[in-house]
């Protein structure tokens, strides 16, 4: 794409790469004259400003010169204050080599000419500077003169060696790009000499044996030190030869595409796969030297280009100097022409004076410059991205902690042939949380083996704080027997210690068994008793038996009797009016309630309770409650709760510093059904304090109750669970408590709480990011219907691949409906009116008319369906039923086509050549309502006609066995034998008035169905479009229909009508399978771009296909395809 241009007959030179902004120096060319025969010369510097959309370049400075130039280079030697430094060296036609200062030319200050020498005796046509030492310059002239100049000491040049014989002109010199002391020179006779400046002698000579290689250019390979290219100016041999000094007997490769001799070549230093060449056939080509393929052709004018150069700073730019006096700057990356077109229109508009251009005294209205519709606003770039655009390396993280990396492997530098180097993509597993994975594996192993007690013991030993140890001790107790007793011990309450303290308080000696009896002492006493009894029985002394030594049967007989004459104690029953008398009277009459009330009133609580026991359970409870209400001391509330079994008051009213005592009371007395709720209530009170200490105490309460959700909420209250290790701590406790609850309930605990699901999903995501996919999948809640969790489960399942742990299992449900997208018209209801009619199954006709592109058809019942490639981004297209030909056997009538009324079609223009079945009679079968026959033939011309519906019991007529005489209806005939291979979309209708049925005046002139099916048809073979290419037909036809709906002006509609016809040639070639793979691949890429409505990309692919294909293959359909995409892009359909 042309970016800038200026009219000069000059040699260009780009500013060096470090200099900014980019400038272009132009020195007037020698041996060239313009139309004015101007002989002046100048050296000009222009700034290339791409912010300006116009084609003009800004002149920075100019210096008149006495000599015209054959060559000009800009060397990065020296620097100016404004960045415009370096040196300009020009070789003139009189043998003068001059060094200029670009800074002085721009500022017009000091002397611009820094150095000058006339050592050469003829025109200096060759100049090149050393890429390693910018102060070294090589020049070549007549008589094999080659000088090496040092810009630090310009007066004394050196020679690379003795002159080659016979003396010849030096057309080009070039420094090696890899070895700084190697220089090459070439002459028009086709010989190239390689010089070694260390030895001051030529080391190798290259020449073509055909003697027709007139060298016009020579360049070293940017990366391979032993390879160079030579360009031939001879029209008989317009080639580029690539040589390798290791095989210097013949060219390594020959690039042939130009038809006339080459004038200039340029090799990109940024990408060795880009080699420019200009020739006398008015073409500028860009080659890939490795493959010999032309990958780009610049759109140039019909003029020879004698000098082309790549821009050192911006590798996408190049300059071209042509003999018509224009210097142009191009870009190989393509672009849009809209800005340039608008700029030209503005220039045209501003060139007219709207006030009074003709001196008539009348002011003209503002000029309305017509805006032409740009058919091509985009210029395609290179076929493949250049090296500076391609990523040398790349990395991307993928799901599951995978890191995908690639790099561009370097080919063997000294390889004479272009060996394809395989490009590798590396998939690595990235692990950043090693401790998390280790702890996760330990937890998973414990959960799977069931050894959670050992796991808890290990966590207790590793716990960093006392509170952490307490939590794991409480979790451990859940897996042991008598959990409540052990919870009490963890809280500091032991029955043995308590009994010892009570005995000490009461002054008694507490025996070790806890019941006041020492077992050892009891055994000794029993032994002593047995010894005494045996001794007494042996002596026979009965009178000396002690009570303790008597036999058990004599024990009760030896009990002393109570004295019978003991005096009985008498007492009085008071009946006075005081408290005692009233109590006695109440007891005498059985009024226990009154007696209890009197005792309570008199402070006799012991008597009140004793009497209440005799008065029944209800009176006892009332008495206890009254007593407890009157007693207000430190243990009254505890005694009250123990007596009344009302532990809610203790939980809700106790001081939080006594949480251990409250929890101990619950562990001792609470009913199992109420225990969990009471523990949760106590934990909620502790959690409400919002301190870390209280939250840890609340966690212990929740562990006792087995409430996983509350434990998670409380734990997350004081900790940032976004940290992986903190979340691991929480999940460990959560899963261990969950397993303990499952052990207690003997059933699995489902995760239904949103906070549990959130934490587990976050944890699963962490594990997945570390590559532990199977473990992550096991932690996801199974019963959750949240879309994010279901998506995570689906990704984890499929990310494990065939070898994963989940492979072979049923895939998890996906949260969204899977929609199969197929190609079709986005709005079938707005489809254009296409003539559609039903026709007999075995016959097709032809009538001249507009080509109606067929859409995908549905398969016949009983036959396998044809594969149809879906078009992404379009809804399914309306399909119709295509019946096959019937046979002689009678059976159910075949289904008919449906279609639009005949009056909806356009007047048929001149016919196109088509193939098909051609009966010699009009064919107008009936149509079925409710069907869209998009590929049926148009109706016979005439007024609107009624549709004739074939009845369900219709029987096809018998075949005709004799000529039809006249146009009368035929009855009782059978259908002719079916014809195979017809295509309804490629048929026309014929009309013979002599064979038309006679109708009464005023009746609709419609031929009989029996007549239409009576005559046999000529059989013509017709192929189907291959199934893999049906998507092209669907997409392009749908695009034309959408454009027809949106088009307003008649000119666009005419273009679209023509497109419908000319796309038929494409479909014919698809049927015949005569298109090359390159064209088919491009068409499928265009189809995908159209389906995605990316018309800009589609036009770029179109240009690439046209430039790389044989135009005779595609001239029938590719131009109209471009027109349709341009229209679609403009209409925005």
Image (cartoon, rainbow, N blue to C red):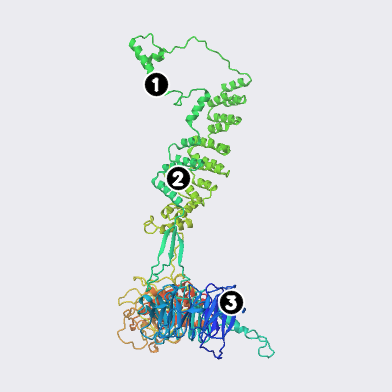
Q: Residue furthest front?
A: 156
Q: Based on the displayed image, in which of its 4 quarters is residue 686 positioned?
A: top right
Earlier sequence position, callout 3 versus callout 1: 3
Label 1: state its secondary structure: helix
Give the Cα separation between the discs numbered 3 and 1: 123 Å
Q: Nearer the viewer, residue 1045 or 888?
A: 1045
Residue at the disc numbered 2: 736
Give the Cα separation between the discs numbered 2 and 3: 80 Å
Q: Which mark is residue 103?
A: 3
For discs 3 and 1, the disc positioned in front in the rendered view: 3
User: Residue 903 location in percent, x, y?
Assistant: 47, 81
Q: Nearer the viewer, residue 1006 or 647?
A: 647
Q: Is residue 644 left or right of residue 519?
A: right
Q: Based on the displayed image, in which of its 4 quarters is residue 346 positioned?
A: bottom right
Q: Say if residue 936 shows up in the picture.
A: no
User: Residue 692 location in percent, x, y?
Assistant: 55, 44
Q: Which mark is residue 573?
A: none
Label 2: state its secondary structure: helix
Residue at the disc numbered 1: 523
For discs 2 and 3, the disc positioned in front in the rendered view: 3
User: Residue 249 location in percent, x, y?
Assistant: 35, 79
Q: Nearer the viewer, residue 197 or 268?
A: 197
């Amino acid at each position: 794409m042309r970016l800038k241009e200026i009219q000069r007959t000059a040699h260009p030179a780009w500013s060096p790469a470090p200099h900014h902004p980019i400038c272009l120096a132009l020195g007037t060319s020698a041996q060239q004259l313009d139309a004015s025969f101007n002989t002046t010369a100048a050296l000009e510097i222009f700034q290339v400003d791409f912010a300006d959309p116009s084609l003009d370049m800004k002149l920075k400075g100019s210096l008149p010169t006495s000599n015209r130039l054959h060559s000009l280079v800009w060397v990065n030697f020296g620097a100016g204050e404004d960045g415009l430094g370096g040196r300009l060296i020009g070789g003139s036609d009189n043998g003068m080599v001059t060094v200029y200062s670009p800074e002085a030319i721009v500022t017009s200050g000091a002397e611009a000419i820094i150095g000058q020498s006339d050592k050469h005796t003829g025109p200096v046509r060759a100049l090149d500077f050393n890429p390693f030492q910018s102060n070294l310059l090589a020049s070549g002239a007549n008589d094999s003169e080659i000088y090496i100049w040092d810009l630090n000491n310009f007066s004394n040049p050196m020679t690379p060696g003795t002159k080659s014989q016979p003396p010849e002109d030096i057309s080009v010199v070039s420094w090696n790009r890899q070895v700084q002391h190697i220089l090459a020179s070439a002459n028009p006779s086709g010989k190239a000499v390689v010089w070694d400046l260390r030895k001051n002698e030529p080391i190798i000579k290259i020449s073509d044996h055909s003697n027709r290689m007139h060298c016009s250019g020579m360049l070293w390979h940017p990366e391979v030190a032993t390879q160079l290219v030579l360009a031939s100016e001879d029209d008989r041999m317009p080639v580029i030869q690539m040589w390798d000094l290791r095989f210097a007997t013949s060219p390594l490769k020959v690039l042939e595409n130009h038809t006339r001799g080459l004038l200039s070549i340029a090799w990109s230093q940024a990408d060795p796969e880009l080699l420019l060449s200009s020739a006398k056939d008015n073409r500028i080509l860009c080659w890939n030297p490795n493959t010999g393929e032309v990958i780009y052709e610049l759109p140039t004018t019909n003029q020879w280009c004698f000098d082309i150069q790549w821009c050192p700073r911006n590798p996408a730019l190049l300059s071209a100097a042509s003999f018509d006096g224009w210097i142009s700057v191009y870009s190989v990356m393509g672009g849009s022409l809209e800005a340039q077109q608008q700029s030209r229109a503005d220039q045209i508009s501003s060139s007219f004076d709207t006030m009074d251009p003709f001196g008539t005294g009348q002011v003209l209205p503002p000029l309305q410059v017509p805006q032409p519709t740009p058919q091509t606003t985009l210029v395609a770039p290179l076929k493949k991205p250049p090296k500076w655009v391609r990523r040398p390396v790349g990395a991307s993280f993928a799901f599951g902690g995978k890191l995908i990396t690639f790099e561009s492997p370097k080919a063997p530098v000294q390889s004479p042939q272009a060996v394809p180097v395989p490009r590798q993509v590396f998939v690595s597993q990235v692990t950043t949380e090693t401790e998390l994975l280790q702890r996760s594996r330990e937890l998973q192993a414990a959960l799977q083996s069931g050894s959670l007690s050992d796991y808890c013991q290990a966590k207790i030993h590793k716990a960093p704080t006392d509170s952490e140890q307490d939590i794991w001790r409480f979790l451990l107790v859940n897996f042991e027997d008598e959990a409540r007793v052990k919870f009490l011990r963890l809280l500091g309450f032991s029955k043995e210690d308590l009994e010892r303290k009570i005995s000490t308080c009461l002054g008694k000696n507490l025996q070790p068994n806890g019941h006041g009896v020492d077992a050892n002492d009891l055994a000794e006493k029993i032994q002593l008793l047995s010894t005494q009894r045996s001794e007494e029985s042996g002596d026979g002394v009965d009178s000396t038996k002690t009570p303790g030594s008597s036999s058990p049967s004599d024990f009760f007989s030896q009990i002393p009797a109570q004295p019978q004459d003991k005096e009985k104690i008498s007492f009085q029953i008071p009946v006075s009016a005081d408290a005692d008398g009233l109590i006695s009277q109440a007891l005498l009459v059985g009024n226990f309630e009154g007696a209890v009330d009197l005792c309570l009133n008199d402070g006799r609580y012991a008597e009140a309770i004793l009497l209440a026991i005799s008065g029944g359970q209800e009176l006892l409870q009332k008495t206890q409650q009254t007593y407890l209400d009157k007693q207000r001391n430190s243990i009254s509330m505890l005694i009250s709760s123990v007596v009344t079994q009302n532990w809610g008051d203790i939980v809700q009213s106790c001081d939080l510093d006594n949480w251990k005592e409250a929890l101990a009371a619950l562990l001792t007395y609470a009913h199992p059904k109420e225990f969990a709720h009471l523990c949760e209530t106590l934990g909620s009170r502790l959690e409400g304090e919002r301190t870390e200490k209280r939250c840890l105490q609340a966690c212990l309460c929740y562990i006792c109750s087995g409430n996983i959700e509350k434990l998670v909420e409380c734990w997350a209250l004081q900790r940032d669970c976004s940290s992986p290790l903190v979340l691991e701590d929480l999940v460990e406790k959560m899963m261990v408590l969950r397993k303990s609850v499952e052990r207690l309930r003997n059933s699995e605990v489902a995760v239904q709480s949103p906070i549990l699901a959130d934490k587990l999903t976050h944890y699963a995501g962490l594990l997945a990011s570390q590559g532990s996919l199977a473990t992550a999948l096991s932690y996801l809640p199974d019963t959750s219907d949240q879309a994010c969790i279901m998506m995570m489960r689906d990704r984890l399942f499929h990310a494990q691949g065939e070898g994963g742990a989940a492979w072979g299992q049923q895939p998890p449900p996906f949260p969204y409906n899977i929609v199969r997208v197929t190609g079709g018209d986005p709005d079938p209801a707005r489809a254009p009116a296409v003539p559609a009619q039903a026709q007999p199954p075995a016959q097709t006709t032809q009538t001249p008319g507009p080509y109606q592109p067929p859409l995908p058809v549905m398969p016949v019942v009983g036959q396998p369906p044809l594969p149809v490639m879906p078009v992404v981004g379009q809804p399914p297209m309306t399909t119709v039923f295509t019946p096959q030909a019937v046979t002689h056997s009678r059976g159910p009538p075949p289904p008919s086509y449906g279609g639009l009324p005949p009056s909806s079609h356009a007047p048929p223009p001149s016919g196109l050549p088509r193939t098909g079945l051609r009966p010699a009679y009009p064919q107008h079968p009936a149509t079925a309502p409710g069907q869209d026959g998009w590929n049926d033939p148009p109706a016979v011309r005439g007024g609107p006609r009624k549709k004739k519906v074939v009845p369900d019991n219709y029987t096809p007529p018998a075949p005709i066995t004799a000529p039809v005489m006249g146009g009368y209806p035929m009855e009782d005939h059978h259908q002719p034998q079916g014809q195979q291979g017809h295509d309804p979309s490629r048929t026309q209708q014929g009309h013979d008035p002599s064979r038309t049925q006679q109708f009464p005046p005023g009746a609709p002139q419609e031929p009989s169905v029996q007549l239409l099916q009576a005559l046999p048809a000529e059989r013509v073979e017709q192929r189907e479009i291959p199934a893999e290419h049906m998507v092209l037909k669907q997409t392009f036809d749908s695009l034309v229909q959408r454009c027809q709906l949106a088009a307003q002006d008649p000119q666009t509609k005419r273009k679209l009508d023509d497109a419908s016809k000319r796309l038929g040639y494409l479909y014919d070639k698809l049927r015949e399978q005569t298109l090359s793979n390159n064209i088919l691949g491009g068409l499928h890429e265009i189809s995908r771009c159209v389906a995605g409505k990316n018309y800009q990309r589609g036009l770029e692919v179109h240009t690439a296909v046209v430039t790389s294909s044989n135009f005779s293959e595609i001239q029938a359909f590719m131009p109209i395809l471009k027109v349709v995409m341009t229209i679609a892009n403009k209409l925005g359909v």
